[in-house]
Image (tube, rainbow, N blue to C red):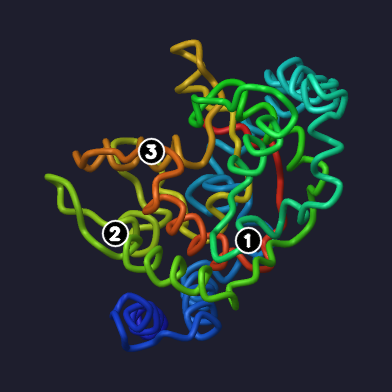
Amino acid sequence: MKKMTLGLAAVALISAGGVQADPKADLEAFQGYFKKIFPEVPLEAYHDGIYALPAGQERAQNWKLLLDFPPYDDDVAKGEEMWNAPLKSGKSLADCFKDKPPANKYPYAKDGKVITLEADINACLKANGEEPIKDLKKGKIALLEVAFRKQFNGEKMAIDVSDPAMQKAYEEGKQYYWTKRGQLNFSCANCHVHNAGKKIRGDTLSAGLGQGTGFPVFRQKWNNKGKPWGTLHRRYGGCNKQVRAQPLKPQSHQYIALEVFQAYMNTGVPLKVPSLRQ
């Protein structure tokens, strides 16, 4: 009980606007909280979502069996083919990204703006005579992201928030993470910090630590509707719907800021793409 109290007190400092504006201190408090409540879970394991948590072990065996013959292999191959295929200019997306940051350093700042992977993919397509992708939640964009991000599996998250644009996004993302919304009046932290590892309607709530390091993901729930792949911003929209709040558009200002905050909180957690989720 004493450890839990100390952990919640540390996390409360992060959520209190203006009290602790130092991202490094936020990071120490955030990751330290999860170390206290799940001392048996190493930092590197959090990319496995609920399957890294004690409460997720009852489903972990079936999950591991599915990973022996992943249902997404054909789709991943299609994504890699599209990634390396020549565009109208003769160049490929692979060519575009030779001078881009590695996947574990997205989002990043350039010319006073926060740049996401989706933005760089569409910028490359447009610059090489192709139409930008409009659906930034699922489908083609997700498969292209998988093709890029899986090249950096095992690399630990290490985004740079020193640029003023990233600092601003970080603070806005932190505020969004801790702000209650929707008819249920829940924040991201209500589920994924304060109740991480607990049951809700038969499901286990994942920990906020590690979220995003496996995206894009192949979800069995989404597969039932024929659209199994989703970007991180698709999942953000789903979370808003679940608390009965109005979902925002993918790549909206708020979702980009939230992505920056979560990416920084994941510092040191390795990428594992794609992920298989229920």
Of residue 2 and residue 86, the one placed in the foreground of this image is 86
Disc with the residue nearer the chain's start (1 vs 2): 1
In the rendered image, the residue lying farthest to the left is 183
SS for callout 3? strand
Place of residue 261 in the rendered image (x, y in percent of width and height, measured from the top left): 48, 64
Can you say whether 126 is above or below 198 in the image?
A: above
The residue at which mark 2 appears reads as 190
Horizontal and vertical percent position of residue 74: 75, 15
Q: Which residue is mark 3?
A: 203
- Asked whether disc 1 touches disc 3, contact meaning CB atoms under 8 Å apart, the reply is no
Can you tell which of label 2 and label 3 is closer to the viewer?
Answer: 2
Is residue 10 found left or right of 241 in the rendered image? right
Circle 2: residue type: Asn
Local SS, label 1: strand
Q: Locate the N terminus and report the quarter of the image it occupies.
A: bottom left
Sequence order check, earlier mark of 1 and 3: 1
The circle on residue 108 is 1
Q: Is residue 198 above or below residue 274?
A: below
Q: Nearer the viewer, residue 263 or 211?
A: 263
Q: Nearer the viewer, mark 1 or mark 2?
A: 1
Q: Label 1 crowding class (10 Å Cα cut-off): few <14, some 14-19, many 20+?
A: many
- Total number of numbered discs in the rendering: 3
Q: Residue at x 50, y 11 (%)?
A: 226
Q: CA distance from mark 2 to mark 3?
A: 15 Å
Q: Earlier in the sequence, mark 2 or mark 3?
A: 2
Q: Amino acid at mark 3?
A: Asp
Q: Amino acid at mark 1?
A: Tyr
